[in-house]
Amino acid sequence: MNQEARKRRAQGILRGLRKLYPDAHCELGFKGPLQLLVATILSAQCTDKRVNMVAPALFKKYPTAKAFAAADLAALEGEIRSTGFFRSKAMSIREAAKTLVERFGGQVPKTMDELLELRGVARKTANVVLGTAYGIASGIVVDTHVIRLSYRIGLTDEKDPRKIEQDLIAVVPKKDWIYFGHAVIWHGRRVCSAANPDCPGCSLNKICPKRGV
């Protein structure tokens, strides 16, 4: 499929997603960029529901980047244990917070390059923070759902998240980048699951090639 055909398919997918999920948004609970940054780090290999159970007490105890930077690592590990991979996540959160304090005045920066300087932050997390906290469309969030669905609906042949993002950026209008990421994630959670996609009940059925299903 050539680029123009993929653009037409992307437009059709977008129209369908907007009918299905007109209010698609990030389902992590947060107040402000710092909380979103931490919640997104915690969400790796973990459900948003679990993160949202852990986060309120965590944010109450550590209300600022300075507080996270000074956290006792063992205590922090215990507080986030149920989210999985708690040792690496705790280290990432504390070290990222230290960088925020030392380099950015305790504030979460608003550029991709600066966010990527933080431990535990790759493009997916940076795109979540920029798009959801700041409304800045610097790319498209590519998580496990977006990886799976982008291939199934025929918008990429790639497996690497960075290459998938570049393919999506090429066919999805920039004004839709933030929405597209949220909506595809919603569709992946609600309809197009990894093991048992509900193709008969999917309103995108007619325009989706169902690759790999």
Image (spheres, rainbow, N blue to C red):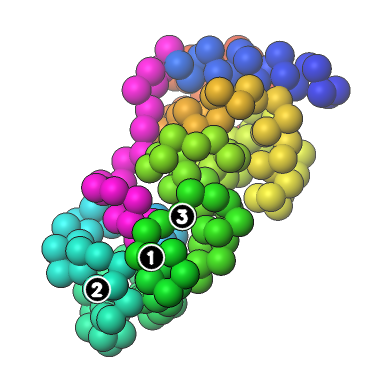
Q: Is residue 84 left or right of residue 172?
A: left
Up-down relation of residue 149 to residue 208 (above or below): below
Q: Amino acid at mark 2?
A: Ala
Q: Is residue 40 visible?
A: yes
Query: Where in the figure is residue 172, as x and y percent of width and height?
Result: 64, 25
Q: Secondary structure at mark 3?
A: loop
Q: Reply yes or no: does residue 24 show up in magenta.
A: yes
Q: Which residues are magenta?
A: 19-38
Checking the image for residue 67, the label placed there is: 2
Up-down relation of residue 202 to residue 48 (above or below): above
Sequence-wise first label, 2 or 3: 2
Residue at x 58%, y 40% (from the top left corner):
138
Can you tell which of label 1 and label 3 is closer to the viewer? 1
The C terminus, quarter of image: top right
Query: Where in the figure is residue 129, as x and y percent of width and height?
Result: 43, 48
Sequence-wise first label, 2 or 1: 2
Q: Amino acid at mark 1?
A: Gly
Within 10 Å of disc 3 (Cα), the crowding (few <14, some 14-19, many 20+) is many
Q: Is residue 109 left or right of residue 169?
A: left
Q: In 3D space, how far apart are the residues under numbered discs 1 and 3 (Cα atoms)?
A: 9 Å
Name the residue carrying label 3.
109
